[in-house]
Amino acid sequence: MRRLFSPFLVSNLRGDFYGGLTAAVVALPLALAFGVASGAGPIAGLYGAIATGFFAALFGGTPSQISGPTGPMTVVMAVIVAQYQHDLALVFTVVMMGGAFQILFGLMKIGRYITYMPYPVISGFMSGIGIIIIILQLGPLAGYDLKGTIPNILAELPRTLLKPEWQALGLGLGALVIVVFLPRRWREYLPPPLAALVAGTGLGIVLLPGAPVLGDVPTGLPSLYLPSFSAADLPGMLSAALTLAMLGTVDSLLTSLVADNFTRTQHRSDRELIGQGIGNMAAGLIGGLPGAGATMRTVVNIRAGGRTPMSGVVHSVILAACVLGLGSAVEDIPKAVLAGILVKVGWDIIDWPFLKRLFHAGLEGADRQATLVMAAVLVVTVFVDLIMAVAIGIIMESLITARRLATHQIDDVQFATAGGKSGIRHKLSVDEEAIIEQTSGRLLLLRFTGPLSFGTARDLSSRLQTIYDGYESVVVDLTDARMMDISIMVTLADMIDRLTNANKQVFVSGRDNPVYKVLKNHRVFSGILKDHIFVSRAEALKEAAGRLSPSHQAAGA
């Protein structure tokens, strides 16, 4: 709270007021549109914008961010409303539960990990959300209210578009033209969504009165929705709440990164999640849509001068004032006008820049793999499930990355023996090379010089097959090792067991390396004698050479 009364806030009060005012002007038509699209009603969109905008500003970790209903959150909310439409208390309980999950995410400090999500996954997911929004709005754009899943809506669209309600279609396309082609010099003073809303409503009243309109919209203070649970519905409610929380987390933190780029500041991810969670719990309590950091509104706020949480507070206060006296003013807004505005929102969410880069780069190598991941995530997002899409994308990207890294990491496993026939000798001293040469190829130095992950385990196991019969002693050098995951540890432990069972001598160097300590804790070296483990590579080589059978020592003399 003390951030609201900081000296910087006072010095930037004018900028924050203009930023909050401008953001509210942009948020008003979008909140109405998202409310209608969700099925919860236009007033739910406004309540959500007020609650999330106010509390996320107060308690969040991105000072200049404006929060409210967004396209991705609305898509999920529409499914929740359809599923629990028999009891709105359950719907808004899910919203509160989603906020509680976000607070838990923040307390667990997992916010920083969101930035590790592969970009093709984010791109495919957001593009899928954009396509869903467009598909959902094509029916209202033509004057029809289509319900059901995306495949069902797609099946109905041909019939709908062939016989549109012409008044609605004209207003919707007119609104779309305004938000797309409004002259740039006008945009500084009149946000395109607001211009489309005012012009479309005016035309609907004067020239095209037959188009479906919002109708009666409640005003005044909201009703409270206390948490309500049903044993039969609880599993589904938890799943839906987790989906909201995860989506809101990604949406908000990506917007936080955008805000950082504009303001040259650094947001606090975990605090932002706590603020978003509090905002969503408040939104659910008053019957509002869930929200997240809204990129367009945040950018508008920053460009108008908003820099502190006060801009988010101003934005919410202005929207609250509108709600108290808005009723009759919004009843005549055509649904098709809101649909036209949302079609542009969906179009903007699609990641066109990334698609263009992939097109120009061609479909070879890494670009082909990135395209495959993005396409898979997009298709699953649109036709199956949002969370499943992200999970599939992360798994695909992880496997692709692991395989790509494996081709480089395996080069960090080096073999050295007499004559240098078994691999590359790198950074060995003259004395160390001399010791190896004196062993007549009966001693092998196995060096790990970099990080090794699970993608390398199979190739490493194949390479190690060559050492089981050809050498009397093996020195495992960890001096320059940097990291080994559990898959590599298992492979290394298996190698040591096979060597010791075959009466081969195994020595280890690099005892002071942290990697050695990790391997020791996993009992990888349990079968190796303590006097076979050294700090120095040279000491290990000398001891291993000294313990070769006499005939071999003589041969090497």
Image (cartoon, rainbow, N blue to C red):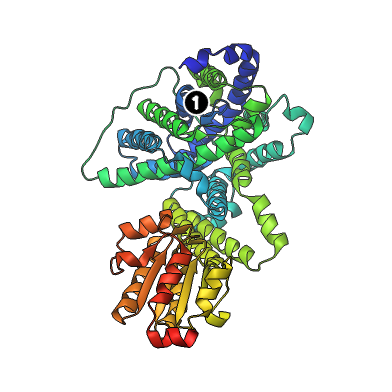
Q: In the rendered image, which quarter contains the N terminus?
A: top left
Residue at disc 1, secondary structure: helix
In x, y percent, where is residue 158?
A: 56, 57
Q: Residue at x 43, y 55 (%)?
A: 513
Q: Residue at x 46, y 73 (%)?
A: 460
Left or right of 416: which side holds 539?
A: left
Pick whichever, 303 or 524, lies toward us: 524
Looking at the rendered structure, the kind of residue marked 1 is Gly
Pick whichever, 511 or 81, lies toward us: 511
Residue 66, compared with residue 152, is above or below; it is above
When asked about the image quadrant of residue 195, the answer is: top right
Residue 219, compared with residue 112, is above or below; it is above
Q: How many marks?
A: 1
Mark 1: few, some, or many residues within 10 Å (few <14, many ≥20)?
Answer: many
Pick whichever, 309 or 507, lies toward us: 507
Pick whichever, 102 or 495, lies toward us: 495
Q: Residue at x 54, y 64 (%)?
A: 405
In x, y percent, where is residue 93?
A: 32, 34
In x, y percent, where is residue 410?
A: 52, 69
Q: Residue at x 58, y 69 (%)?
A: 430
Q: Is residue 28 visible?
A: yes
In x, y percent, where is residue 191?
A: 67, 29
When asked about the image quadrant of residue 51, the answer is: top left
When asked about the image quadrant of residue 80, the answer is: top left
Residue 314, compared with residue 91, is above or below; it is above
Q: Which residue is mark 1?
A: 53
Q: Is residue 333 visible?
A: no
